Every structure is written in structure tokens, then in C-alpha cells.
Image: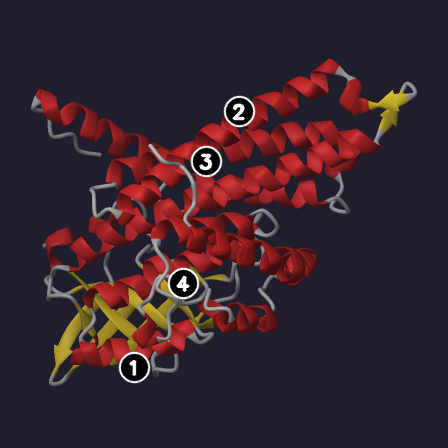
């Protein structure tokens, strides 16, 4: 088995590292304070091809494979998890769903815009429909050559900075998942109203809002995939974003460890650097082992995706493990910082707050464990339900 990166992947990795260190890292604290990713940073990312990372070149994309994309997200998340999460939602949920289900005219209209600097969203969750997507109540009613959207979407990431929304709505009442359809909606369409940015514990740079659709008329040609077959698009989108979030967790964990190592080497107590204390060494070693194990799972999952294999279970495993490793690493490295770790003057505080969201985004820990268990029990003839 060859675990080496190809020459192209190594070239991409070097490019990602330069961008993350020179552009993302200096803006990380500002992003957290301002509760928005700087527009200038998004434009720089677009100019490098990162907002269209996995899109074909004909739509302005960089045509990266999934392993290269995972390296991008990991490297960005090492310095700013908000930016990495926004990138994953934009790319894996929004842009790739349009590529997956849009007509050629729709792809030609929206994908160059999304690759060029406009962010995308994925509006599925509702106040009464979280893990239970079948409880969606937003309606899409046909009106001639249009559909009229009415309903409320909650926790929509990128909403305040978006140029396009992928919206899931019920087109056959009472059919639950079998009546769900997906639409791409221009952010300037009349009938869309945005709530205030949610005041979140972490990921403060991720623009999360409630969206209200009131008589929003969307061209029928903006239907993604087949009518009433939106759930299949959602399932493929979830696989992609879970891989992305796993890579983000890997990067955040690596960033936390790097901060802890630097602090431990410089901070002196009892006349020596605290890195010479075995308790600190144990923290560092334990985190390094977990991060390396996670890295192999993330890269293997990305390889499966690139090979066209079924990676649904692997993506759930990777995302679940990433949330745990990022949480444990941030917690231990904050402890290494001592009282300083409790101060927002130190970046470990921001990472500690941010990584908590990884247990919620893209499906909760509980949903990941269910998805894994469902596959495990299939050979026993059991079809588990949530």
C-alpha cells in the first residue's frame, strides 16, 4: 500500500500551507471577533481556486480529487475552523449538490459564481426538523413555470454571505422523505428574509441564521434532480460534508497540539520548561497518537471517494472520530496552557470553543453512531431505524 502523496497532491499541499499561514492565520482572531469571514479573504481563496476546489474546470473549478480537497480543509482548519467549516458547507453541500443534480443551464449559471467568490448554503434543517429530516414542513407548490416556497429554515450556515441557496422543500405533502425535492435559489430572489446571526458558543466566523421563505418564486428549471427525489441528493451531500468535517477536525486538532507544544516549550515553572514534566509529555504523546490515527482514517476515506467506492460508513466513522479527537486535543492543550488557556487572548481558547461544534455539524455524534451501527447489523438481517 502506497501512502505517499502524488507530485500534484504535494504541490497542492504546499500551496494550501502557504495560503493558510499567510492569509488565513492572520485573520483568524478578526474572523472570530467580527463574526464573519473577511470578504477579502474569500476573494483571495476564490482567486486560488479554493471555492471551486472539486468543481470541473469548465465551471471555474480546480478539479481537485477528494484527497487534495481534504488536505485543503485540514490545512485551513489548523488556523481557522470557521473558515474550514464555511468552505466545506459551500463546496460539499451547496456547489457539489448543484453539480450533482442541476441541469446544464443551472450549472452554467450558478457554479462559476460559486467558484468565483459567492458562498453557497444548504437549507435543510428546520425548527422542528433536525436529525429527523422527514419532518421538513417547508412547501414548494407549483405555479406555472415556477414553484412557490413557503417555510422556515434554521441554522443555515453561510446565510448572510451567500449568493445562492440549496433549499430542501416538501413537494408531496405527507410523503416525508419520499416527497422531498431540492432547489437552487438565487439569494436575491424576492421572498427571502434573513434573521439575525445566531449568537454561538464557537465558530463565530461562520454566518449562521434562520431563513424565512414567504411566497418565494423559484423557476421550475431550478429543481435539482428529479421531483420528490431530493433525499438521494441529501444523502450524497452528507457523505461529502462528513469527510470534509473529518478533515477539518484533523486540522483543528493539529493546530491545538502545535499551540500546546509551543507553549510548553516556552513556559517555565520550577526553573525548567513545563515540557520537561512527564504529565505534559503524556498529554502531547496521547494527542499525537490520536491525530495520526485520525489522519489515516480521513485519508483512507478520501481515497475511497476518489476510487468511486461506497464511503458512507467510513465518512461517518471519520467524522465521529474527528470530533472526539479534536475535542480531547483542544481540552488537553488548554490544560497545558493553564490559566492562560482560559483567556481569549490565547488562540487555544478559540479552538476549544470551535471544536465543540464538530459534534453537531453534519449530523450529531448520535446520528453517526447510528449510521455506523446500521451497517454493522445489516449482515444479521436487521434494518435499524433511528
Q: Nearer the viewer, mark 1 or mark 2?
A: 2
Label 2: few (<14), some (14–19) or many (≥20) C-alpha neighbours in 10 Å: few
User: Tag on residue 109?
Assistant: 1
Could you say whether the residue bearing mark 2 is in a helix, strand or loop?
helix
Q: Position of residue 369 (x, y in %)?
A: 31, 30
Q: Which mark is residue 308?
A: none
User: Of label 2 and label 3, which has the lower sequence position?
Assistant: 2
For the residues labelled 3 and 4, the Cα–Cα distance comes to: 20 Å
Q: Quadrant of the N terminus?
A: top left
Which residue is nearer to you in this view: 72 or 142?
72
Check the image and name the residue furthest to the top. 278
**Hey, which quadrant is residue 309 in on the image?**
top left
Residue at x 36%, y 45% (from the top left corner)? 243
* 4 or 1: tag closer to the N-terminus: 4
**Element type at marker 4?**
loop
Residue found farthest to the right:
271
Marks 2 and 3, how far apart at CA: 10 Å
10 Å crowding of disc 1: few (<14), some (14-19), many (20+): few
Q: CA distance from mark 4 to mark 2?
A: 30 Å
Q: Residue at x 33, y 58 (%)?
A: 93
Outermost residue on the left side: it is 381
* Residue designated by label 4: 53
Amino acid at each position: 500500500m502506497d501512502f505517499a502523496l502524488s507530485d500534484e497532491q504535494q504541490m497542492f499541499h504546499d500551496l494550501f500551507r502557504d495560503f493558510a499561514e499567510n492569509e488565513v492565520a492572520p485573520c483568524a482572531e478578526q474572523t472570530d471577533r467580527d463574526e464573519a469571514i473577511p470578504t477579502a479573504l474569500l476573494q483571495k481563496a476564490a482567486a486560488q481556486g479554493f471555492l471551486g476546489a472539486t468543481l470541473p474546470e469548465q465551471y471555474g473549478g480546480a478539479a481537485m480529487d477528494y484527497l487534495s480537497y481534504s488536505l485543503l480543509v485540514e490545512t485551513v482548519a489548523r488556523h481557522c475552523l470557521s473558515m474550514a467549516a464555511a468552505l466545506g458547507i459551500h463546496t460539499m453541500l451547496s456547489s457539489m449538490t448543484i453539480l450533482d443534480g442541476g441541469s446544464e443551464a443551472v450549472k452554467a449559471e450558478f457554479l462559476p459564481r460559486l467558484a468565483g467568490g459567492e458562498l453557497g448554503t444548504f437549507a435543510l434543517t428546520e425548527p422542528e426538523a433536525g436529525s429527523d429530516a422527514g419532518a421538513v414542513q417547508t412547501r414548494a407548490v407549483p405555479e406555472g413555470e415556477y414553484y412557490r416556497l413557503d417555510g422556515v429554515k434554521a441554522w443555515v450556515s453561510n446565510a448572510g454571505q451567500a449568493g445562492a441557496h440549496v433549499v430542501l422543500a416538501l413537494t408531496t405533502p405527507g410523503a416525508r422523505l419520499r416527497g422531498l425535492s431540492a432547489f437552487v435559489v438565487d439569494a436575491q430572489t424576492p421572498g427571502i428574509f434573513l434573521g439575525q446571526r445566531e449568537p454561538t458558543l464557537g465558530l463565530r466566523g461562520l454566518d449562521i441564521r434562520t431563513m424565512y421563505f414567504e411566497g418565494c418564486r423559484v423557476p421550475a428549471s431550478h429543481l435539482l434532480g428529479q421531483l420528490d427525489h431530493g433525499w438521494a441528493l441529501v444523502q450524497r451531500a452528507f457523505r461529502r460534508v462528513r469527510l470534509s468535517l473529518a478533515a477539518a477536525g484533523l486540522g483543528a486538532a493539529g493546530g491545538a497540539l502545535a499551540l500546546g507544544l509551543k507553549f510548553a516549550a516556552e513556559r517555565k515553572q520550577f526553573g525548567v520548561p513545563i515540557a520537561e514534566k512527564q504529565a505534559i509529555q503524556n498529554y502531547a504523546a496521547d494527542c499525537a497518537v490520536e491525530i495520526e490515527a485520525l489522519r489515516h482514517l480521513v485519508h483512507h476515506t478520501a481515497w475511497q471517494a476518489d476510487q468511486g467506492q461506497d464511503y458512507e460508513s467510513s465518512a461517518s466513522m471519520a467524522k465521529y472520530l474527528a470530533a472526539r479527537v479534536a475535542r480531547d486535543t483542544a481540552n488537553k492543550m488548554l490544560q497545558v496552557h493553564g490559566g492562560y488557556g482560559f483567556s481569549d487572548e490565547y488562540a487555544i481558547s478559540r479552538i476549544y470553543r470551535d471544536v465543540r461544534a464538530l459534534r453537531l455539524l453534519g449530523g450529531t455524534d448520535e446520528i453517526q453512531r447510528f449510521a455506523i451501527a446500521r451497517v454493522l447489523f445489516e449482515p444479521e438481517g436487521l434494518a435499524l431505524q433511528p
